[in-house]
Image (cartoon, rainbow, N blue to C red):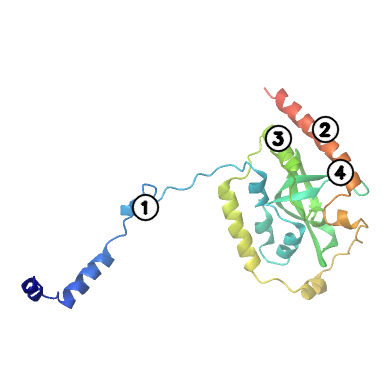
Amino acid sequence: MSDQRSRRVRRPAAEIVRELRNLRAKPLRIDDENETWVNGYEKPATPDLPVTSRDQLELLRLSRHRIGMLLVRPAFEQAVTGCFVRVNVSGQGELPDHRIAEVLGICELDFGYKVEQIPTNVALRLRYEDLEMQHEINDVSNLAFTQEEFELWRDNCVNQAISPPTTHTLTRKKVELYNALQLEANPLSLIQRSFSFPLRPPEKVGIMERHGAAYPWQLIIRSRSFRNRRRKIQRGEKRIP
C-alpha cells in the first residue's frame, strides 16, 4: 500500500489548465426537453394568446394620473395608443357610468383644460361598445376595472367582432410605457408659459366622482343599468346568423 502511494505522480499544472480551457470552450448542456435552444436549436416562441381575464386587461389600463405623467413627455401618443382606460360616458349632471375603452389615438380641441395642474388641449380618441368618441383626459377614472365592466366589454367584443388584445401586446406595451416614462418630462412652468389656448373652467363635482368613483346611493342604479345594457348586447349576439 505504501509502495503504491510512493509511486503516485502529481499531474503537471499545464495539463490541468489545458483541460479546464477545453471544458470552458464546450457549449453548456442541460438535460431538459423544454430547453430546445441547446445544441444550436432556438427556443420556441411563446404563443400569442388573447386576453381572457380582467387581471390581464388591467395590465393595459392607464389611470388618469398615469396619463398625466405621460402627457408631459415626448412619446405620449405612441405610449397611450393601444392601452385601455375606464372612462365615464355620462354627460354633465348625470350619474357617472363607466365603460372600458380602447385608446385609438389622440386629437386636439379648440380650447384648453387642466389635467392635474397641467394645461392641455389634447383629448383621447376612444372606442367602446359600437362607438368611437373623443373624451377629455379628465373623463378617465383612476380606479380599476370592475368585473361587471369587464364582462360587458368582453360581450361587446364578441358582438362587434373586435379582436381583444393579446399577450404579445401586453409585453410590447409594457416596454413602450416604461421607455416613455424614462424620457425627460417637460417642466410644468414651461408648459404653462407656452400654452396659448383659452382654459375652460373646471366642472364642479363631488370628490368621489372627481376620482372616478360613485356615491353608495348611486351604485344600485348603475348596477341595474349595466344589467340592462348587457342583456341588450347578449340579445344582439343571438340575432347574428
Task: Give 93 or 18, whichever is nearer the viewer.
Answer: 18
Q: Quadrant of the N terminus?
A: bottom left
Q: Position of residue 164 (x, y in %)?
A: 63, 42
The amino acid sitting under disc 3 is Asp
- In the rendered view, does 142 fall on the left or right side of 208? left
Q: Which label is found at residue 155?
A: 3
Q: CA distance from mark 4 to mark 1?
A: 54 Å
Q: Name the element at disc 3.
A: helix
Q: Quadrant of the C terminus?
A: top right
Residue pictured at 37% horizontal, 52% vertical: 37
Badge 2: residue crowd in 10 Å (few <14, some 14–19, many ≥20): few
Q: Position of residue 145 (x, y in %)?
A: 74, 48
Q: Which residue is mark 2?
A: 228
Q: Which label is found at residue 12?
A: none
Q: Is residue 193 above or below residue 69?
A: below
Q: Which residue is mark 1?
A: 37
Residue pictured at 72% horizontal, 72% vertical: 186
